[in-house]
Amino acid sequence: MTIRTRARTTTALLALAAMTGLAGCAPGPIIEDGPGEAGTLEVQKVNPADFAGQSMSYVYFTDGPDEAATRELIASFEEEYDVTVNLEVLPYSDLVTSVQARLSGGNAPDVVRLTGLTDFRADLLDLRTYLGEDYAEEFVDGPVKGVLGEYGEMLAVPSDLTLNGPFINVDLFNEAGVPLPDPEDPWTWDEMIDAATKVRDATGTEYAFAIDKSGHRVSTVLSQYGTALVGDDGAVLDEAKAVEALQPLVDMMADGRMPRDFWLGSGSRYEGANDIFLAQQTPVYLSGNWQVGQFADNADFTWSAAPNPCADECGGFPGGKYMGALAEGPNPALGAFFVQYMNTTKAQQKFIVAGGFLPTRVDLTERGVQYPVRQEDMDVFFADLARTPDLGYEANSQPSYTGASLELVDQLALVVAGEKDTTTAVSDLQAKSEQLVEELQP
């Protein structure tokens, strides 16, 4: 694996950042040498004081506690640089259609928070134009994969990172006399299923294991078996490994160790199994680090995060959010400047601590982050970052990933319903992924 850092280069731009806390640049277009070719990047520095009196808009959706931290950071930015930021908070379900409508109407916002770049890749500003060629070096390589264009354009900043992984009901494990997993020596998949089944049998819980109804979450299992839906080389699913990865889930839903009806309901729509875990109906639940705060507030039993189980690979499957400036926004220079400010070391630390996220900056990843609650559980996710293979980051960065992950949900549901066998479903999944790659990937 692989959280790797890149070599640092001291430039005049970074020297300015060290003096002001930011690097500000005037509009400077990328000069293309010809169609489909990377060209020379022109970056003109400006004094950040030149932004005084200007305004911009930020379209945002919230995961909960991150909104308060965002508002505090915006207030600091406004005060320090004498600017106005109009924060527009939308429901996540409305964000894509709203921003698309504004782009169509010639009323683009300056900055937008996103879960992926697919819908706006052609509309996003290349941040290198304002922040320089080396800006991406401040961020960990894996998350950066999701923001780079075909010719190295930096189309957004990875503003926070999530990682899928399991939680365990410690009380149930102790009641059953089943040893807890060793954070330094993760379970294999067989060991995890065996432990969960023993706990269920000893304590009488309804299930042994639960996982969110989510292609992203099931991609965790694929990754651990050494494969992914899509990658830099297109539709890359290893069908034999995918069958091996999915069959244990199918078998557990067939014999009642996993909630079968939960998986068959709601079509392709995401459904979280957190209520099943909170109701103590299962001793093991695979979700992700964003659940830590919720469980800290709502669980009336002892629980903990556990390291991801290993098969061919260990670690989890990454996700996260991005901040991008729109090229057609009224003030792209200020937009880029704002994106940079909101992702400085100090600002990102404040934001991720509030939201229970993981960092994307190299410096924060290297030194670690102190969280106000459940530090040991967040440290489990930190440790699993170091075990997570690159294929997850590559998959997430592809325009075809979202569609392929929805197809994964549909095909697995057909197997659970008895309408297909796992081998046929995986073959059909690969065919659909190939079609999506052909349609969507450059």
Image: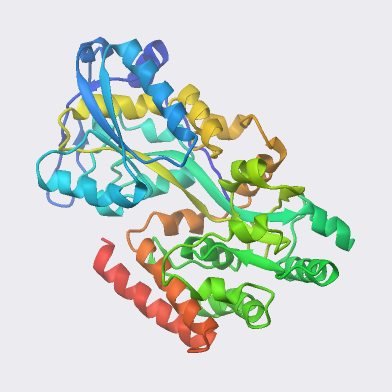
Residue at the far left in the pictured view: 106
Residue at 44% over, 68% down: 229
Residue at 23% over, 31% down: 129
Q: Tell me residue 289's x, y (percent).
A: 59, 47
When the figure is inspected, residue 265 is found, relative to residue 421, above or below; the finding is above
Q: Is residue 266 left or right of residue 263?
A: left
83 or 1: which is nearer to us? 83
Residue 179, visible in the rendered structure: no
Q: Tell me residue 402's x, y (percent).
A: 37, 62
Q: Which quadrant would residue 398 be assigned to in this image?
A: bottom left
When the figure is inspected, residue 332 is found, relative to residue 416, above or below; the finding is above
Residue at the far right in the pictured view: 177
Q: Tell me residue 325's x, y (percent).
A: 26, 36
Q: In this figure, what is the number of numbered marks?
A: 0
Residue at 14% over, 43% down: 33
When the figure is inspected, residue 236 is found, relative to residue 51, above or below; the finding is below
Residue at 45% over, 45% down: 143
Q: Is residue 257 left or right of residue 49?
A: right
120 or 254: which is nearer to us? 254
Q: Tell me residue 130's x, y (percent).
A: 25, 28
Q: Quadrant of the C terminus?
A: bottom left
Q: Which quadrant would residue 12 be assigned to in this image?
A: top left
Q: Is residue 86 left or right of residue 80?
A: left
Colour scheme in use: rainbow
Residue 80, visible in the rendered structure: yes
